[in-house]
C-alpha cells in the first residue's frame, strides 16, 4: 500500500469512528435513561420519535440553544479549555482500540483499528491520565467551592485507581508479551480469555475502570446530592455537553478496553473451525466485538442503578487497601501460571 | 401465635460474615434484584392520553357548589377564608333578596396560594365549597391563577361523588 | 366601706351597689345580657343568677342590692347548672345562623355559649319563626329570630336617647320588638342599640355584610364630628375604613356616640376626592409632582412676598401638633402675625346629650397651640377683609375650605398671587390653589385633640399611607394585614401619598433655612408641653386611652351630658 492509500484509509476510519462515537455516545445516554427506567419499573423517554428514538437529538438541540454562562470569578481561559481537553482525550483514546481483525477488500488488507500502535496500551494509559487535567482544570477554574471539591476528589480518585489499573493490565501484558492491542486480542484465542484465566485481575480492572470513568458507585467527583454536580456545576450549554459527551465516551472506551484486554476482543471462540468465507467471518467478529461492547456497557448501567455511592474514605480504602494488593496478587498469579505452563 | 424469630440487625462491619465482607456476592444479589425488575410491569401512566381518574377521597381544586337553580350554596360567611392556612380565599359578602340573605359578591381563590388541605371544605357549614377532582392547574401568570366565581361554580350534579364521601366520613 | 364576700374573696363596695356592680368594680365577671351599667335594671335574661348564702333560691346579681357581710358564690355547682339552663333556654329559639350573622365574633351569646353552656340542646321541635330583615329606622336593621328579648334597645331609647320609639309586642315565645305605630327609629343615637345588642338582632344598614369582624383591625381614635370628641375605634380592612364604633370613656362620651359621628366622619378618608401626591398649578391645571419639587416651588414663591402680604389660616380640624407647627411656621419662619383659623359652628347640630354646637374636634386645641394673631397681625375677619382689599397677596391655608365658608370671597381668592393649601380632599379652595399639599386625615396620623370640655385626647393612625407603615408604625394589624403581600388583592389597598401637616411644614421650613428637628408627632408634643403652660408635664403615655382633663379657662361651651 502506498502512503497515500494508508492516509486515505486512516482518514476514512477516523471519520467513521468519530461519527460512530458521537452517535453511540448520544444513544448511550438514551440507552441509560431507558435502562434506568426499566429497572425502576418506569417507561423512560418514549415521546420524541418512535419509542423516544429521537430523544438524543432533542437533548442536543436543547443544549445548543442554552445560554453559555461563565461565572464572574472563573478563570476564563482554563474554564474554556477544560471541556476541550476532556473531549479530546475521550475521542483520541479510541484510536488504538481494535474492533475487528484485518479486513480483506479488493486486495487491500485493512486492519480494523485506526492506529495499530505497538505501544497502544501505554498510549491509552497516558491519555486517560491526561483526562484528570480536564476535571481538575474545570474544578479549579470555575471559582466555586463545589467545583473545586469535585475536582480535588476526582484527581485523587483517578490517581489512586490508576495504580491498580496499571498493575491489572500488567498481568495481561505478561501473557500477551506485547503492548499492541491487536496482539493482546490475538493472545486470547479460543476460550483463553483473560477474564477466565486471571479473574482477580479482571475484577480489579473492572472496579478501577468504574473509578476512572467516574461512574457510580464511584461518581464522587459529581456527587449530585453533596456537590451539585461537582466539577461541572458551573458549566452550561455546549461546554456542559462536552463534559457529558466525554463522560459517556470514556465509558465506551473503558468498555472497549475491557473487551480488548479481558474478553477476547473481537474473537469468537473456534470460529475458524467452521470454514466460513473470510469476509463473513470478519463481519461476524466485528459483530461479536459490538455485542461484547454493548453487554459491558449494559453492565455499567446496570451497576449504576443497583448500587449506592461509596463514601470518600471508603473509596480510598478500597483503592489502596484492597484493589492495589489484589492487583499485585494477580501479577504473581499470572507469573506462576506462566512458570507452570511454559 | 407463631414465634417470630428475630434476627439481630447487622449494622457494623464486625457483624458481617466473610461472605458478606467479600461484597461481590452481595453485589450480585443486588444486580439480580434490579435485573428482575426490568421485566416487571411498568407503573408509568402516559399522562395526556391516559388520565388519572381520582377517587372520591381525592382533594383537587376547591370549587363552589351550584344548585340547580343556578345559585351558589355559599352564604359568604367567610369561615373558609378564616380557616385557610395559606390565606388563599377572599370572600366579599353582599345582601340578596333570597332567603339566605347573604351571597358572595366576590369569591376568589388564589390557586397559587392554595395548598389543597381541604380545611375550607371541612369548615363549610353549607356544604358549599368542596374539593373537586380537577388537578390540571397550570398558569402562565399570577392573574390567571385567581379563580373567581365564574371558574369556581360547578353544578352539584357533577360533585355528587365527593358530597357523598363527605357525608359518610366528614 | 362595707364588705361583701364573692367567691371567698372579701371585697369592698359602695353602698347601694348591686352584686353585679360590686363584682365588676373588683374585676369579677358575672355573665349578663340585659344588664348594662348605664341602663336601668330589667332583670329579664336571668343569666346573672348567683348563689347567696342564707337565701333560699338563686338570685339575679343585677338587681340584688349588696349588703354588708353578704356571701356570694358565682361559680358553685348550682350557679353553673342554672347558667347552663338559661343558655339552653335562650338558644332554643335562637337560629344557628352565626355564619351569616354580622355579630359573629363579637357576640355575647356566642361567647357565653362557649363559656357558660354545656353545648347540648334537648330541643327537637321546630324553632319559632319570626319576622326577619325589618328596617326599624334609617340606620338599623332588625332580625326578630335572633333577638333574645333583653330589652336593652328599648331602655336605651327611653333613657339615653330620650326618644321612646321601641317596644315589645306579642307574648311568650312570640315576643318581638317593633317601633310604635307610625314611628321609625330615627333618633340621632339609634346606632348605639347595635352596639349594646348582645346578639346580632340589630345590625347596621351601613356596615351590614361588609366584613367579618376578624378580618378587620381596629385602632383607638377620636371622632372628629364635633367638639365632644367621642372616643372611637376605627375598623379597617385592606387599608379602607369600614366602620367606626364607640369606645368607652366616662370622661367624655361614656358608652355612646351619635349616628352622624359613626357614619359621616370617616367617609372622606376612602373617598375618590383624596389628594394623591402634591399638586402644582401649571397652565391653569393642577399637575401631580414629587414632594421635593413641590417644596422648592412653595419656597421660591413664599420668599417673594413681604411679611405683611402673607396670611396663614390654621384649622380646628387639624391636631394640636399641626397647629403648633403652623403657628411656629407663621411667626418664626414667615414672620407674619396674620394668623388665625375659621370657627365652624352649627347651633342646629347641638343637643343636650352629646352633640355640640362647635362641629370641629379641636377649636380649643387650636387656640392653645398658639393659632392666634400677633398684636399687630390680622385675625380671621381682618384676613378676610384684607383678601377682599387685595392687601394680602399670599395665603397659606391649612386643612380648611375658605371658599366654602365664605362663598363671597371666591372672586378675591381667585385674585390671590399665591394660594398654598394643605388638604386631604379636593374642595372649593383647591380650585384656586397654586400648590396643594396632600395632608393626612385624622385616621392617618398621631396627634392630640383638645375637646370642648378641656379633655386632651390622642388620635392614632388606622389607615396606612405611603409614609406610614402599618407594621413599622405600630398600628394594630389584622391577620390579613400581617400576611398579605402586594400580589394579594385583599392586602393591596390604596395607600395615599399624604403627610401630616406638621411634617410638610417642617420640610418647607427646612427649605427656607429654618431648622425644626421633629421626626415624630410625639416630639412636637413634648416641645409643646415644655412651652405651653397648660400642657406642662403631660406626655403621650399619660394621655393614654382615656385622655387628660386640662384646666382651660374658657369652659363656657361645656355641656355636661
Image (cartoon, helix red, strand yellow):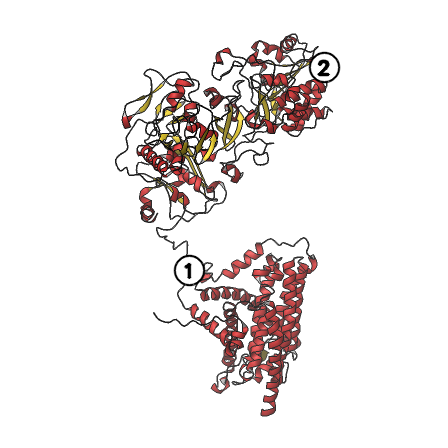
Spatial CA distance of label 2 from label 1 is 87 Å
C187, above or below C88, in the image: above
The residue nearer to you, when weighing A263 against C357, is: C357
Quadrant of the image occupied by residue C341: top right
Q: Nearer the viewer, residue C89 or C63?
A: C63
Q: Is residue A342 visible?
A: no
Q: Which residue is tagged 2?
A: C307
Residue A29 x %, y %: 53, 64
Q: Looking at the image, which residue is at 57% across and 54% down?
A: A65
Please check whether the numbered discs 2 and 1 fall on a single chain. no
Indicate the secondary structure of the residue bearing disc 2: helix
Residue placed under numbered mark 1 in the picture? B44
- Counting from the top left corner in percent of width and height, residue A93 is at 62, 72
In the drawing, does residue B170 fall left or right of residue A162?
Answer: left
**Image mark count:** 2
Callout 1: chain:
B
Q: Which mark is residue C495?
A: none
Q: Residues within 10 Å of mark 2 (few under 14, many from 20)?
A: some
Outermost residue to the right: C513
Which is nearer the eye, C96 or C77?
A: C77
Q: Classify the position of the C terminus of chain A by image quarter.
A: bottom right
| Residue C503 picture quarter | top right
Q: Nearer the viewer, mark 2 or mark 1?
A: 2
Per the image, label 1 sits on a secondary structure element best described as loop
Q: Would you place residue C71 above or below residue A326 in this image? A: above
- Residue in view at x 70 percent, y 15 percent: C336
Q: Chain of mark 2?
A: C
* Res B143 seen here: yes
Mark 2 and 1 residues: CB-CB less than 8 Å, in contact? no
Spot occupied by residue C234 in the image (x, y as percentages of width and height):
51, 28
**Relative to C184, is A318 on the left or the right?**
right
Amino acid at each position: 500500500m502506498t502512503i497515500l492509500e494508508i492516509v486515505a484509509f486512516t482518514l476514512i476510519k477516523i471519520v467513521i469512528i468519530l461519527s460512530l462515537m458521537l452517535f453511540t455516545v448520544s444513544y448511550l445516554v438514551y440507552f441509560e435513561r431507558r435502562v434506568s427506567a426499566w429497572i425502576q419499573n418506569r417507561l423512560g423517554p418514549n415521546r420524541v420519535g418512535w419509542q423516544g428514538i429521537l430523544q438524543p437529538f432533542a437533548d442536543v438541540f436543547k443544549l445548543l440553544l442554552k445560554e453559555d454562562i461563565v461565572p464572574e470569578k472563573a478563570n476564563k481561559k482554563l474554564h474554556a479549555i477544560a471541556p476541550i481537553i476532556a473531549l479530546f482525550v475521550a475521542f483520541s483514546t479510541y484510536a488504538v482500540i481494535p474492533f475487528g481483525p484485518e479486513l480483506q477488500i479488493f486486495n487491500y488488507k485493512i486492519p480494523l483499528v485506526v492506529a495499530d500502535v505497538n505501544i497502544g496500551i501505554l498510549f491509552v494509559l497516558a491519555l486517560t491520565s491526561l483526562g484528570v487535567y480536564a476535571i481538575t482544570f474545570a474544578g479549579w477554574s470555575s471559582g466555586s467551592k463545589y467545583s473545586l471539591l469535585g475536582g480535588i476528589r476526582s484527581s485523587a480518585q483517578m490517581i489512586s485507581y490508576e495504580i491498580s489499573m496499571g498493575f491489572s493490565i500488567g498481568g495481561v501484558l505478561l501473557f500477551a508479551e506485547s503492548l499492541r492491542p491487536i496482539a493482546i486480542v490475538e493472545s486470547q484465542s479460543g476460550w483463553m480469555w483473560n477474564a477466565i484465566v486471571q479473574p482477580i485481575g479482571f475484577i480489579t480492572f473492572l472496579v478501577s475502570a468504574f473509578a476512572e470513568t467516574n461512574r457510580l458507585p464511584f461518581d464522587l467527583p459529581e456527587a449530585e446530592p453533596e456537590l451539585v454536580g461537582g466539577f461541572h456545576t458551573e458549566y452550561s450549554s455546549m461546554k456542559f455537553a462536552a463534559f457529558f459527551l466525554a463522560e459517556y465516551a470514556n465509558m465506551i472506551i473503558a468498555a472497549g478496553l475491557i473487551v480488548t484486554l479481558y474478553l477476547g476482543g473481537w474473537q469468537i471462540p473456534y470460529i475458524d473451525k467452521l470454514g466460513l468465507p473470510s469476509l463473513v467471518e470478519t463481519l461476524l467478529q466485528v459483530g461479536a466485538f459490538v455485542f461484547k461492547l454493548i453487554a459491558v456497557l449494559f453492565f455499567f448501567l446496570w451497576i449504576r442503578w443497583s448500587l449506592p455511592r461509596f463514601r470518600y474514605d471508603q473509596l480510598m480504602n478500597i483503592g489502596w487497601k484492597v484493589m492495589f494488593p489484589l492487583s499485585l496478587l494477580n501479577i504473581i498469579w499470572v507469573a506462576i501460571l506462566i512458570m507452570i505452563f511454559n | 401465635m407463631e414465634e417470630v424469630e428475630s434476627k439481630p440487625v447487622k449494622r457494623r462491619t464486625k457483624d458481617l460474615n466473610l461472605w458478606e465482607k467479600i461484597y461481590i456476592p452481595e453485589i450480585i444479589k443486588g444486580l439480580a434484584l434490579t435485573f428482575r425488575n426490568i421485566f416487571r410491569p411498568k407503573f408509568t401512566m402516559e399522562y395526556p392520553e391516559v388520565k388519572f381518574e381520582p377517587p372520591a377521597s381525592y382533594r383537587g381544586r376547591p370549587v363552589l357548589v351550584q344548585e340547580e337553580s343556578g345559585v351558589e350554596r355559599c352564604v359568604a360567611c367567610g369561615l373558609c377564608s378564616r380557616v385557610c392556612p395559606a390565606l388563599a380565599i377572599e370572600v366579599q359578602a353582599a345582601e340578596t333578596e333570597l332567603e339566605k340573605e347573604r351571597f358572595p359578591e366576590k369569591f376568589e381563590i388564589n390557586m397559587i396560594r392554595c395548598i389543597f388541605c381541604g380545611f375550607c371544605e371541612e369548615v363549610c357549614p353549607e356544604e358549599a365549597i368542596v374539593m373537586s377532582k380537577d388537578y390540571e392547574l397550570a398558569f402562565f401568570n399570577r392573574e390567571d391563577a385567581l379563580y373567581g366565581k365564574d371558574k369556581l361554580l360547578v353544578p352539584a350534579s357533577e360533585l355528587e361523588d365527593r358530597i357523598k364521601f363527605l357525608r359518610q366520613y366528614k | 366601706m362595707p364588705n361583701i364576700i364573692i367567691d371567698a374573696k372579701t371585697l369592698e363596695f359602695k353602698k347601694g351597689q348591686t352584686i353585679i356592680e360590686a363584682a365588676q368594680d373588683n374585676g369579677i365577671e358575672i355573665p349578663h345580657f340585659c344588664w348594662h351599667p348605664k341602663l336601668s335594671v330589667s332583670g329579664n335574661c336571668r343569666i346573672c343568677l348567683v348563689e347567696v348564702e342564707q337565701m333560699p333560691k338563686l338570685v339575679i346579681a343585677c338587681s340584688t342590692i349588696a349588703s354588708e357581710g353578704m356571701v356570694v358564690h358565682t361559680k358553685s355547682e348550682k350557679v353553673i347548672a342554672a347558667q347552663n339552663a338559661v343558655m339552653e333556654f335562650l338558644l332554643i329559639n335562637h337560629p344557628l345562623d352565626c355564619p351569616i350573622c354580622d355579630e359573629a365574633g363579637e357576640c355575647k351569646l356566642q361567647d357565653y355559649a362557649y363559656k357558660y353552656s354545656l353545648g347540648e340542646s334537648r330541643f327537637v321541635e321546630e324553632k319559632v319563626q319570626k319576622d326577619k330583615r325589618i328596617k326599624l329606622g334609617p340606620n338599623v336593621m332588625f332580625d326578630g329570630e335572633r333577638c333574645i328579648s333583653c330589652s336593652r334597645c328599648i331602655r336605651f331609647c327611653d333613657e339615653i336617647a330620650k326618644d321612646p320609639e321601641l317596644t315589645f309586642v306579642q307574648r311568650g315565645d312570640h315576643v318581638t320588638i317593633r317601633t310604635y305605630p307610625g314611628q321609625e327609629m330615627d333618633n340621632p343615637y339609634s346606632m348605639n342599640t347595635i352596639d349594646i345588642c348582645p346578639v346580632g338582632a340589630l345590625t347596621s344598614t351601613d356596615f351590614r355584610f361588609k366584613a367579618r369582624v376578624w378580618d378587620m383591625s381596629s385602632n383607638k381614635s377620636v371622632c372628629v364630628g364635633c367638639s365632644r370628641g367621642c372616643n372611637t375605634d376605627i375598623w379597617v380592612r385592606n387599608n379602607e375604613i369600614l366602620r367606626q364604633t364607640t369606645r368607652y370613656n366616662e370622661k367624655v362620651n361614656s358608652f355612646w356616640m351619635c349616628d352622624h359621628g359613626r357614619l359621616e366622619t370617616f367617609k372622606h378618608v376612602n373617598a375618590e376626592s383624596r389628594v394623591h401626591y402634591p399638586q402644582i398649578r401649571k397652565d391653569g391645571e393642577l399637575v401631580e409632582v414629587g414632594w421635593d419639587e413641590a417644596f422648592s416651588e412653595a419656597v421660591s414663591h413664599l420668599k417673594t412676598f413681604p411679611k405683611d402680604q402673607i396670611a396663614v389660616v390654621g384649622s380646628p380640624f387639624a391636631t394640636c401638633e399641626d397647629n403648633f407647627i403652623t403657628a411656629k411656621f407663621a411667626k418664626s419662619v414667615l414672620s407674619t402675625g396674620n394668623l388665625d383659623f375659621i370657627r365652624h359652628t352649627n347651633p342646629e347640630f347641638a343637643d343636650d346629650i352629646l352633640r355640640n354646637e362647635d362641629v370641629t374636634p379641636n377649636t380649643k386645641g387650636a387656640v392653645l397651640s398658639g393659632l392666634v394673631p400677633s398684636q399687630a397681625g390680622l385675625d380671621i375677619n381682618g384676613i378676610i377683609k384684607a383678601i377682599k382689599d387685595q392687601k394680602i397677596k399670599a395665603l397659606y391655608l391649612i386643612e380648611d375650605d375658605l371658599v366654602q365658608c365664605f362663598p363671597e370671597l371666591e372672586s378675591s381668592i381667585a385674585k390671590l398671587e399665591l394660594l398654598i393649601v394643605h388638604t386631604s380632599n379636593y374642595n372649593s379652595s383647591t380650585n384656586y390653589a397654586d400648590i396643594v399639599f396632600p395632608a393626612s386625615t385624622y385616621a392617618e396620623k398621631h396627634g392630640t385633640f383638645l375637646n370642648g370640655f378641656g379633655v386632651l385626647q390622642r388620635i392614632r393612625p388606622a389607615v396606612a399611607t405611603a409614609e406610614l407603615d402599618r407594621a413599622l408604625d405600630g398600628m394594630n394589624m389584622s391577620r390579613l394585614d400581617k400576611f398579605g403581600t402586594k400580589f394579594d388583592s385583599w392586602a393591596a389597598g390604596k395607600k395615599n401619598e399624604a403627610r401630616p401637616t406638621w411634617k410638610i411644614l417642617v420640610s418647607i421650613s427646612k427649605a427656607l433655612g429654618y431648622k425644626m428637628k421633629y421626626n415624630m408627632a410625639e416630639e412636637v408634643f413634648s416641645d409643646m408641653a415644655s412651652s405651653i403652660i397648660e400642657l406642662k408635664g403631660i406626655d403621650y403615655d399619660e394621655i393614654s386611652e382615656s385622655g387628660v382633663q386640662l384646666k382651660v379657662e374658657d369652659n363656657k361651651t361645656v355641656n355636661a351630658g
